[in-house]
Image (cartoon, rainbow, N blue to C red):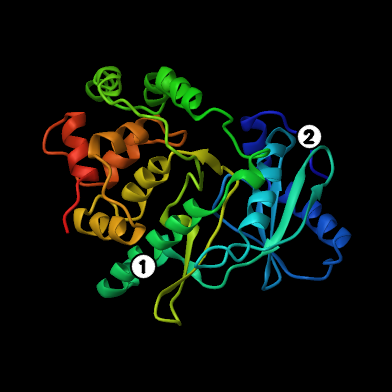
Amino acid sequence: MLPSVDTVDELDEVVRDEALLRPAVQDLCAQLGLGKIRVLRFEEGSLPVYEVGDSLVLKLYPGFESAEALREARVLSHLEGRLPVPTPKVHAADLYKNNWRYVLMSRLPGEGLARTWRRIPAADRDRIVTEAAEVLAALHAVDPEPVADVVGPADWGRFVAVRRANALAHHRAAGLPPHWLEQIPDFLRSVPLAAPARGVLLHTEFIREHLIVDPHDGWRLTGLFDFEPAMIGDPAYDLAGAALFITRADPRQLGRFYAAYGRAPHPPRELLAHTLLHVFSDLVWSLRELPAPPRPRLDDMAEAWFGTVG
């Protein structure tokens, strides 16, 4: 059965070992009364996730990520029926063995937006951007207080301060070239980030990979998933991610996104600051995948990636 793991490296070894995982998944399914249902592994994700039959998903979390398991189950239960698109419904969530936890949830209908984006007609892409913005606005309007005991941080200002202090080390470890690294301290000092008037429930990874569309229903959005890293904080933290991963630095699409979200665009330098501070920030990927700034300066990067038209 599943061994106890205490580090990310140990987890990576287990995640790669399907011969170790599958018997445990089958054992757990049997305990849940699902012993004879087909089980298939999803390829994506840093945690083991399985399709169980046609309508269920089983996600496993090691003991050192038990807080994430509790958070995802609670947030999903809190969000059920509150957004314009479905979120997974929790069917069961508990402790398994050797401190592993699990969440058994419903499977959302459709296909991943990231995989299907190139097949989607331009007019439908525009509509999807609008629908995605409406989903994010609805998420940010949900009262986070009922899940505040499992969703942090307790102090957003302190979280931002810690991220500022660690930003250079974060991006150096990710392999960002020196000419970008040397600009980060002065850039962050020049962009004050006032505490939000109200902390909102953040997805933190509002990206194409976590949105579902139905190609058989006019490419409509049919779901949003993966609330394991949810937080409570400044909405700009999510909006920066949406600009990079939903609209992909397209100024027309980003303007459309803001219009549907229901607010004026954030200043580009503020969004870049949130990007630099984001827990999952990877500027090396962004520089490879997004339009190149006209000059190798963070101010130019801010305008190139977070400027809007329309």
Q: Is residue 250 left or right of residue 47?
A: left
| Residue 288 seen in this snapshot | yes
| Residue 16 seen in this snapshot | no
> Residue 109 at x, y = what percent?
56, 72
Extreme residue toward the front, this view: 197
Foreground mark, 1 or 2, reads: 1
Q: Residue at x 42, y 31 (%)?
A: 195
Q: Which residue is mark 1?
A: 128
Q: Residue at x 24, y 44 (%)?
A: 306
Q: Residue at x 51, y 72 (%)?
A: 110
Q: Quadrant of residue 100?
A: top right
Q: Which residue is mark 2?
A: 4
The answer to whether residue 219 is above or below residue 178 is below
In primary-sequence order, the first of circles 1 and 2 is: 2
Extreme residue toward the left, this view: 294
Mark 1 falls on what kind of element? helix
Label 1 close to label 2 by CB (< 8 Å) = no
Q: Quadrant of residue 295?
A: top left
Under mark 1, the amino acid is Ile
Q: Is residue 86 left or right of residue 263?
A: right
Mark 2 falls on what kind of element? loop
The answer to whether residue 269 is above or below residue 264 is above
